Structure formats: C-alpha cells, structure tokens
Image (cartoon, rainbow, N blue to C red):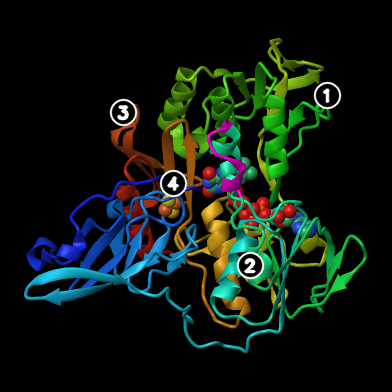
Amino acid sequence: MAQDQVKPGGPDLTQGLSLGELADGDKLLGHVGDEEVLLVRRGAEIFAVGAHCTHYHGPLADGLVVGDTVRCPWHHACFDLRTGEAVRAPAFDPLACWSVEKREGRIFVRSKRAAPQSMTPGERASPAPQKIVIVGGGAAGFAAAEMLRRRQYKGSIVMLSADTASPVDRPNLSKDYLAGSAPEDWVPLRPDSYFPDSGIELRLGANVTAIDAASRDVTLADGSRIPCDRLLLATGAEPVRLSLPGIDQPHVCTLRSLADSRAIIEHARTARRAVVLGASFIGLEVAAALRARGIEVHVVAPEKLPMERVLGPQMGEFIRALHQEHGVIFHLEDVANAIVEREVRLRSGTTLQADLVVVGVGVRPRTSLAEKAGLKIDRGVAVDAYLETSAPGIFAAGDIARWPDPHSGESIRVEHWVVAERQGQTAALNMLGFREKFTAVPFFWSQHYDVPINYVGHAEKWDELTIEGDIAGKDCLLRFKRDGRVLAAASIFRDIANLQAELAMETDRQS
Ligand SMILES: Cc1cc2nc3c(=O)[nH]c(=O)nc-3n(C[C@H](O)[C@H](O)[C@H](O)COP(=O)(O)OP(=O)(O)OC[C@H]3O[C@@H](n4cnc5c(N)ncnc54)[C@H](O)[C@@H]3O)c2cc1C
Ligand code: FES
C-alpha cells in the first residue's frame, strides 16, 4: 500500500537524549531529518529502526517489543531490531536501521546503516535442491519464492500460477480497492520486474493439471512437463458456487482474484442495487465496499447473526448493527432460491431487485492435484509440522494445508492471509533443507468501514467467552476459552492486548 506522508514526530534524535529518558524495555518515537525513527532499549543495547511497518505503514511505536524484535500492532508483522529484517509476514521489506552512539550518558542516533544481508537460520539437515517448482501465485507461493531468494538460494525457482495477474494483495480486493479508495497500483505484491530481477520464473495463466508424487514432475494444461527436486503446492481455495437457477448470469459474481474484483467494480459503475449472498467476512467486506460506492446493498444469509459462529453472538450483533448504521439491509435466516434476470427470489417469498449479485458463501480448498497424485488428504492436504505432505519433497502451504497446530493440539486448516504467507516462508526454509516446524499462532484481520477486527488463535468451539471493554464502543478484547484455556482472542482497537494474547498463546502449547 502507498504510504501516507507523515510529519515526523518526537524529538530530533541526532541532537541526543539522556539515557535516563529511555528505561530498559522502553521504546520512544523520534525523528532523524524527515524520517520517523523508533528507539528501543534492551538492557545495554539501543536500537534505532524505521518507525513504520513496511506492510501497510502501521505505527511500530504502538507495537510490542519481544526480545530483540518488534511486532506491528495492525497485522502482527515482526521485525528484527538488530538487522531490520521482516522476520514474519505480512511484511517482507526490512526496516531501515540507524547506528546509535552512547556518549556521556546520552544517546545519539547517527547515520543510516546499509541494508542487511540475509541470514541463514541454522544448519541444514540436507543440501539445497537444484530446482524448485511452486504451484500457485498467491500468498503462500509468493512468500515462499521471496524467502528462497532472501535466504540466498541460487537454484531455479519456477512459479506456476493459473491467475493472469502476478501475485496480488488479495485482502485488498474486498476492501479499499473494491471500495474505490485504493488505486490498482497498490494491489500487486511486487512490480512485475521483481520476478525476472530476482531470478523467479513466474508463468501466469499456467494451469497445472497433474503432479507425479514419485518423480515430482509437474504437468501443465498444454501437456508440457517440468521436473523438480522440491515442489510446493499452494493452490489456495476457490469460491463455493451455489447451484441456483440463474447463477450463471453475467451480473452474478464471486470474488477471489483481481479479475473478479475488477468485474465487480465494472458492474458497480452502473448498479443501483446489489444483493450479497452470504454474511461472512468476504460478503460483509463486499457489502461495505459497495456502500462506499453509494449502492443500495441487501445481504441475504441463513444464519441468525453475521459471523456468530467465529466471533460469538455479541460481536455478531455489533457487526450487524454496524452494517445497518451504514445502510446495509439484512435478510437473515433466509436464502436465495433463484435469480431471475434482475430479481433475486428468496425462500421467504421476498423478491429483491439486483443489478449486481455477489456470492460470498465460503470457499473450498483446491486439493484436486494432491488428490489425483495420491497424497494424504484430510479435509485439505495433510502436512506434518514441517509442512511436508505424505510424499517426500512435496510441501503444501496456505488455504489447502491442514497442519498439526501445537496451540490447539488439533490438526487445523484455516483461510488466513498471514498464515498462508508464514507457511510459505516455513515451507521455503524446509525445501532448502532446514528443519523448521510451523508453530505460528494463526492470525487474521477483517475490516468493516473504519472498524478493524483482529483475531489471533483458533477456536472452532468454546465453552466460555469473556469480554473486556465495550464492543459497541469499538474498544474491546474477547477471549474464547475451552476448559479455562484461551484458544483465541478477538479485538477492536486493542492492538497491544491482541499482540500480548498472541505472545501468551505462543508459550501455551498442547503439543
Ligand atoms: C477478497 C478476499 C479478501 C480476503 N481478506 C482477507 C483478510 O482480510 N484477512 C485474512 O486473513 N485473509 C483474507 N483473505 C483470505 C486470504 O486471501 C487467503 O487465506 C490467502 O490468499 C490464501 O493464500 P494461498 O496462497 O493459500 O492461496 P491464494 O492466495 O488463493 O493463491 C492460490 C494460487 O494458486 C493458483 N492455482 C490454483 N490452482 C492452480 C493450478 N491447478 N495450477 C496453477 N495455479 C493454480 C491460483 O491461481 C493462485 O495464484 C481474503 C481472501 C479474499 C478472496
Ligand atoms: S501494517 Fe504492519 S503488519 Fe500490516
């Protein structure tokens, strides 16, 4: 995303400040010239790094310092304070680092240091492969390719994507971009030139039709075959398609790709009324984006309250009220029976006029390649703690992967951007022969108008829900517990508490 022009805040750090003004563990926002700089003290060491997250520019002064790292309050990216490296997605670019001088009880921030060289995480268990193929050009596939090059992998990387666009910031497709408040050049994760410049052979419109689990050969729709030493499956998920009369009409859309988002925007240019089928994250983000475009929006869904299953009834009630305040008209405990030209007919007998219909009723993991290849399937592609499938040398990451989650003690599969990216990063390291378990606590965010909801952990079922603060006042932290253990936490504008909940869950493992 583009960065806002920020007037630098805090003291001029080149002029020095007293050591006593920065207690051990404290952080302080200041500036050097026009750039905002975060100063952090850890014992005798003082770090000076860029004050804004390289993902969406989140304010790191409001983040959490953990050891020699700082975590972003918005979407939990994590940066090494020593090197500036973005050690956890969703950020990829490092923070700038400045050298710090301590003299006569004062701290002075001096010149900017050279960008860090990439580091290796430890000893390899096996030599690096010659050729890696990544199937999928989404969150997990991109993060894997980026990490391979960041770790100085010199071999070949071929990235095959059925999409026609190079990897995009998919969460934006239902938020600012769809609402018309972000230009399209915010959407690519990297400019097109990044891929050839990084030696990543990105093939777009490349549909993989088969993989051979023994030889790891990949077959494309045109019949060509690509051999490789290591293979990453990161094929994501596809929207569930309803079997409904009228569903195939051009004004009935789903949303997964940039092309889908563009198609909705095109219809929205002339639409006066839209019907959204589904009241979960995608459906409601689309509803918010269409309201921002001044379109009348009706949301139809079978549940009593939106998002109750994931966030509980109180948050569900809040989300419904929030959308109603913005003019969304709900038709809950109802479903569409048919779409007849510009009418959506509901089971209740209601008929809604719609120039645009967006179907957001969930997704299905794209597991067919893995299934056909005989890989172990368990409501997704089953992987071990290293994200390796049942076929040695073949890894899976992102929406398709079901992995042993050490926090819940269960095998889980989620559809979260940050999880997919972090899994791509871990899979990359393991394809290079490092042995890194995937242990990240799941995290997702969702944005409704000006209200962000951050969720950390994973609670499919809970027996206790505690609420701190005030949901209606948009200042709250909800904890989802089972047998007294916190499985997940959701918050609105309590970012530091959400980061602290993540940290607590990292140390509270079931396996
Ligand atoms: C509109 C939208 C908004 C979202 N917002 C959020 C959010 O706010 N927060 C959040 O946490 N999550 C969000 N998500 C979910 C998040 O985007 C996904 O969890 C994430 O993209 C999954 O990453 P992935 O790499 O597994 O799959 P994807 O990003 O879907 O990538 C899959 C890739 O595989 C390719 N592919 C599939 N099959 C083949 C094949 N046979 N051959 C070649 N290529 C193939 C596809 O073309 C695509 O490039 C959102 C999703 C959508 C659609
Ligand atoms: S802005 Fe920092 S993680 Fe998104």
Which amino acid is tagged 2? Val
Decide which of tag 3 and tag 4 comes sooner along the chain.
Answer: 4
Front position among marks 2 and 1: 1
Q: How far, Cα to Cα, is label 4 from label 2?
A: 24 Å
- Residue picked out by circle 1: 246
- Residue picked out by circle 3: 473
Does residue 144 lie above or below 52 as drawn? below
Q: Measuring 58% from the left and 40% from the top, which residue is drawn there? A: 183
Which amino acid is tagged 3? Gly
- Residue picked out by circle 2: 383
Location of residue 64 by image quarter: bottom left
Q: How far, Cα to Cα, is label 2 from label 3?
A: 42 Å
Callout 2 secondary element: loop
Callout 1 secondary element: loop
Callout 3 secondary element: loop
Number of callouts? 4
Contact (Cβ within 8 Å) of mark 4 with mark 1: no
Q: How far, Cα to Cα, is label 3 from label 4?
A: 18 Å
Q: Measuring 40% from the left and 48% from the top, which residue is drawn there? A: 74
226 relative to 318 in the view: left or right: right
Give the residues drawn in magenta, as a range. 179-187
Residues 276 and 106: in front is 106
Q: Measuring 59% from the left and 83% from the top, which residue is drawn there? A: 433
Contact (Cβ within 8 Å) of mark 4 with mark 2: no
Residues 56 and 218: in front is 56
- Residue picked out by circle 4: 455
Front position among marks 2 and 3: 3
Front position among marks 4 and 2: 4
Q: Callout 1: 10 Å neighbours few (<14), some, many (20+)?
A: some
Q: How far, Cα to Cα, is label 4 from label 1?
A: 36 Å
Which amino acid is tagged 1? Gly
